[in-house]
Amino acid sequence: MDDHTALIRATLDHIHQGVCIFNKENRLVGWNQQVANMLSLKLTQFRVGADFDFLFRRLQDELRIQSGTSPASVLAWVEDRGPRPPLRFEVRQRQGRVFDIFAQEMPDRGFVISFTDVTAERRAAAALRAANDLLEARVEARTAEIAVALADAERANASKSRFVAAASHDLLQPLSAAKLYCASLADDTLAPAQTEILSKALNALNSVEDIIGALMDISQLETGNAPVRVGAVDLGRVLRQLGDELHPAARAKGLDLRIRPSHALVQTDASYLRRILQNLIGNAIRYTRTGRVLVGTRTDGDALRIEVWDTGPGIPLAEHENIYKEFHRIDPAANTGNGLGLGLAIVERACALLDHPHGMHTRLGRGTCFHLTVPRAGLPPRDAALPAPEPGTDLAGLIVLLVEADSQTRRALSGLMERWGVEVLDVASGTEAAALLAEIDLVPDAMLIDAPVDDGHAGLALIARLRAQFGQVPCRMLTADCTPGLGADCVLMDVSLLLEPVDPAALAFFLASARVSG
């Protein structure tokens, strides 16, 4: 028995935990040296037969229970006469050491208490919590900084868009007047050298117009805040309007522009679809020197594939990815126009915005086909296209109502149309227009209505009032505002946009169309 006791004592002294053993009368019968070291007590204070209550009271000033266990609950566990479940809690010593205490009943109703030093673990956990709190604080601070930066960037983008719109409008007004005055001079008898200079001036003005329009488009697409209004769109109407605008440019280059009629309804944003097709057809006209440009559609399951073919030089394989980059042109020297190379960048971003798949195939020296796929919507419309005007249609005697707030543009437009024999009723506002028409009791053959840059829908409201009074008079909206919402509403009202600076050829084509439809 002595040897067995010595073995147990040696075992207890060599484990890293402190151990105390109490009998069923709650008196100390065994312990090891580690428990005295942990509790900073002399071994002489541990004696056989010491009562648990006595030792517990001696240690209460030295140790503080950390967990939800209280001193009273510990004493109640010790005094419990029934079966006792294991008890576990933590205490903190004055010096800062933390012990994990585990008490368990023995078969003879005595119990063993073990002390495990968990100071290092608790310090590591505390350090980890502090690091986590610091990291969370830094993340929150960084998130706040990013939110502020994002808000600043959004405000800057919005401010940039407003600035581009306002600046472009301010630039386009005098530019439009300059183009109209140049067009008026072209009707006079000029010397060949003067005619050449005038032609170069008009080309330069057209280039400035294209650049400003492209910058406005790309600016709106970059912000990501441009509204998208998807609905059923009459594709045939969009194609007819584009034909009215682009046929003069094609004829000026000797190209045969053919736009096959369509009676399909497609699910898209009317204004963005118009921009995409305008850029694709405009590019085809710009880069094709001889031959023709063909626009048509093919059925593709539940969708419609719109294709723009040209007989241009084709696109080298190495440039297939580059053509969609901003400000990139394959061969600037071969480009008969002076654009910035933004047309296809606008097409790609607008198609991505609308989720319309697009692509291209080309053959060097033979031509290129750009295409996009749009979903169908509902049944096709039954309205028929207006007959296209013949080149050189006589405009003499045509009565046109012109509402233009800018006096310089109004004078230039009036002067140009009067030289064509058009009778112009020019006013500065919708109020003046209503008063004038009521006074002379006359229905105009066509209307040109200015749309203010800060409220393009005010122009549409005026058109609606005038049409309610005089019937479905052919009308064009004069605007430098290319926002998607305005373009979509114009399509719904069967009103085409005549973008400023006004192209004299497009204006003449519209007036000729109005005479034919009348």
Image (cartoon, grey):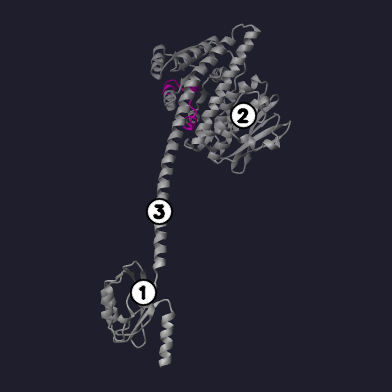
Is the residue 26 above or below the residue 498 in the image? below
Front position in the image: 189 or 338? 338
Front position in the image: 429 or 106? 106
Instruction: Name the residue that disc number 1 marks.
Output: 38
Spatial CA span between label 1 and label 3: 33 Å
Cβ–Cβ under 8 Å for marks 2 and 1 = no
Instruction: Name the residue that disc number 3 marks.
Output: 134
Label located before the other in sequence (3 or 2) = 3
Q: Is residue 107 magenta?
A: no
Label annotation for residue 281: 2
Dot 2 amino acid type = Ile
Task: Tell me which residue sits at (60%, 20%) in the image.
Answer: 389
Dot 1 amino acid type = Met
Q: Which residues are magenta?
A: 465-488
Label located before the other in sequence (2 or 1) = 1
Task: Tell me which residue sits at (39%, 74%) in the image.
Answer: 116
Q: Examine the image and state in which quarter residue 245 appears.
A: top right
Q: Is residue 292 left or right of residue 32?
A: right
Secondary structure of residue under mark 3? helix
